[in-house]
Image (cartoon, grey):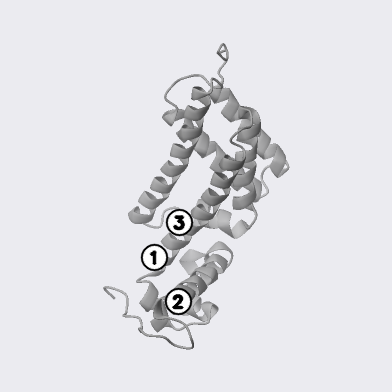
């Protein structure tokens, strides 16, 4: 199979071809969230099983995707987009708050979004790992966007006189690793703490990076 099959065109039952295609894609992604994020997992799912779970045919699958890896790639990006939307809304809402309160609001929004559905955690931190060089590149590229967001917020804090001036990219990369690791372990039941306590710990780590010992606000 070198490419997707051509999808039908024209209106049907009051819906355009584009609307029907978007609905089919959503149904495949909804089914994939359940099957990849819960049981049986990405590696044990077949095109036939996913199509059946979506209530669609394998032909319709190949009209939307080439492979199951394409579905996982799209789902991984979707899960990250949901989290990013929540974070950007929190950033806007907390824009006028002091640094500690702003950071707390942002990370509570992120944590609440990614942990609200354990399937999202599994897609983001488990199923995507080791699938292929292509998906590894996507995973790292998407993580780099989170690093960019942390750096942007750190630079804004510097401009306000709330944080020490420096290049935060390396520190932000290490911090994002801490965020992912802690939230994954919390979701898996390996962290004896509430989600609020986990977020508070992450905020303390971030403030320690932004306000190192010996630095004083100007």
Q: Is residue 99 above or below residue 121?
A: above
Q: Is residue 90 above or below residue 151?
A: below
Which residue lies under the disc numbered 2?
19
Disc nearest the viewer among 1 and 3: 3
Picture disc at residue 77: 3
- Looking at marks 2 and 1 on the same chain, the residue that comes earlier in the sequence is marked by 2
Q: Quadrant of residue 213?
A: top right
- Left or right of 134? Residue 148 is right
Which residue lies under the disc numbered 1?
70
Q: Are marks 2 and 1 in contact (CB under 8 Å)?
A: no
Q: Is residue 160 above or below residue 152?
A: above
Q: Looking at the image, which residue is at 57% across and 29% down?
A: 206
> Which of the image's four quarters has the C terminus?
top right
Whole-number angstrom distance, CA of label 2 to CA of label 1: 20 Å
> Which structural element holds mark 2?
helix
**Badge 1, how many Cα within 10 Å: few under 14, some, many 20+?**
few
């Amino acid at each position: 199979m070198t490419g997707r099959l051509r999808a039908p065109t024209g209106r049907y039952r009051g819906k355009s071809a584009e609307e029907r295609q978007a609905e089919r894609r959503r149904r495949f992604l909804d089914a994939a969230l359940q099957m990849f994020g819960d049981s049986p997992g990405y590696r044990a799912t077949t095109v036939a099983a996913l199509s059946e779970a979506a209530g669609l045919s394998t032909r319709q699958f190949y009209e939307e995707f080439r492979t199951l890896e394409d579905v996982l790639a799209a789902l991984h990006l979707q899960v990250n987009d949901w989290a990013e939307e929540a974070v950007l809304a929190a950033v806007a809402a907390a824009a006028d708050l002091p640094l500690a309160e702003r950071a707390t609001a942002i990370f509570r929004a992120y944590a609440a979004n990614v942990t609200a559905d354990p399937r999202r955690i599994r897609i983001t931190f488990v199923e995507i790992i080791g699938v292929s060089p292509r998906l590894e590149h996507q995973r790292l590229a998407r993580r780099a966007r989170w690093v960019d967001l942390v750096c942007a917020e750190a630079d804004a804090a510097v401009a306000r006189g709330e944080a020490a001036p420096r290049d935060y990219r390396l520190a932000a990369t290490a911090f994002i690793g801490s965020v992912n690791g802690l939230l994954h372990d919390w979701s898996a039941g390996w962290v004896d703490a509430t989600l609020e306590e986990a977020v508070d710990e992450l905020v303390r780590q971030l403030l320690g990076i932004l306000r190192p010992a010996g630095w004083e606000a100007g």
